[in-house]
Image: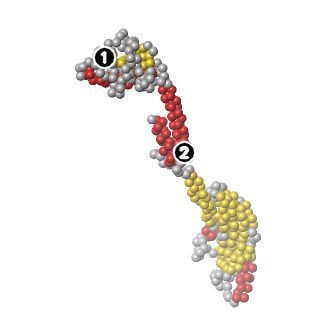
Amino acid sequence: SVVSVLALGGLALGAVAFSRPTWAVSARQVAYTQAGTWAYSAKASGDVYQNGTVRTGEPIFTAVAPVAEVSFDYRLASPVPARVNGSARLVMVVSNTNCWFRTFPLTRALAFSGPSSGLSGRVVVGSVQRLLARIQGETGQSTTTGSYTLAVRAQVDARGTLEGAGAFSARFDPALPFTVSSGELQVSYGQVGAPSTLAQLLHPSEQGSVVVPEKKPTKLSVLFLHPSVASARAVAVWSVAAALVALGVLALLLRKAAQADETAQIEARYGALLVGAERPPGLGGGETLRLGDIRDLVRVAERTGHMIVHCAADGGRDYFVREDATTYLYTARSGPGWDGGRAGPAGVAAAADGSAPVTSQSAGPAEDAVQARANGAAPGRGTSGEVL
């Protein structure tokens, strides 16, 4: 029973486990952030600026500070280790409200390796003022206050790999805009389409992510357990293998048992009904009903409620049940090959006194005899057994 349950359970688990994939592919996003910090400064003459230095956030008066130094620090951050390289440069874009613009390089494209890089360039404010004056003369338009913008842009092209997430390629193009007016450059923020605060303008950032296929082991739901499909397959295979081994062992044991002595088989099968004793005198004489099958004697014992007494006999062992004056006797012969008493030397009991053996049918002479005694009649000779 245990082996059968083990085998059936293993087969059922294997049927489910081998019908499911062991792995499931899902998409996982690995995020990264590109960020930077703008700063500018200028040396100024006179008493307009504290210590003669223009600092980040202050307006630049071109009359006293004609040249400004602009810097941009780039960095890429990710929750996983990143290998980054690329190139970056600074450009200056002068434009007006009617979509006219001119681009001037401030630095050449510089290669970098690592998650951070720094850029710096020089803006000659006087040159910008002279450029706008020439445009005014050539187009006949006046440089109205606030109509022109000067923007320093950082153009960063980054590429690399994120650990466990594969390759990525990203572009980062933040700008530091100034409004150009007569003799002044003023940082532009708080306007439509611009950062609302100076801090947001000076610290731009941009989010990105890399979509990575991720393999995860699939699981089963078995009662309150959630094993992986791979584990369930292994358990199923080992269960079936163990059941096959156990069946092989049982087959060997059954084969060995089938070749055992008949008395040993009777002891193994009906030991709970047997009582050993010395051989009583006169056993086999008088009103003795010899039976040809031990199972007939077992039915007699169960019907009458008596134990089966056994004792040594010539060449075997006698088993008997006494009911009043009648003795129901079965003789087992020593030697292998017992088939339950149906045929052969082990299934036909010879009389202890040398008389011919008598074989009972499935109805059983014992049952006829017991029924006859229950009706008050003596057992006769008209049955398949013989009363001696």
Q: Tell me which residue sits at (62%, 61%) in the image.
A: 210
Identity of the residue drawn at 68% across and 72% down: 153
Q: Residue at x 52, y 30 (%)?
A: 252
- Mark 2 and mark 1: span between their CA atoms? 64 Å
**Furthest residue in direction top, as rendered:** 281
**Closer to us: mark 2 or mark 1?**
1
Percent position (x, y) of residue 281?
Answer: 36, 9
Please name the residue that numbered disc 2 is placed on.
233
All told, the count of numbered labels is 2
Identify the mark nearer the N-term, 2 or 1.
Answer: 2
Please state the horizontal and vertical placement of residue 101, each as a whole percent of the image.
Answer: 68, 80
The picture quadrant where one finds residue 282 is top left
Left-right relation of 4 to 182: left
Q: Position of residue 94 (x, y in %)?
A: 69, 78
The way the protein has been coloured in the rendering is secondary structure
For disc 1, the marked residue is 326
Tell which of 91 and 320 is nearer to you: 320
Q: Which x, y percent locates residue 205? A: 62, 66
- Assess disc 1: are there few (<14), some (14-19) or many (≥20) residues with their C-alpha within 10 Å of its C-alpha: some
Which residue is the extreme one toward the left? 376
Mark 1 secondary-structure assignment = strand
Callout 2 amino acid: Arg
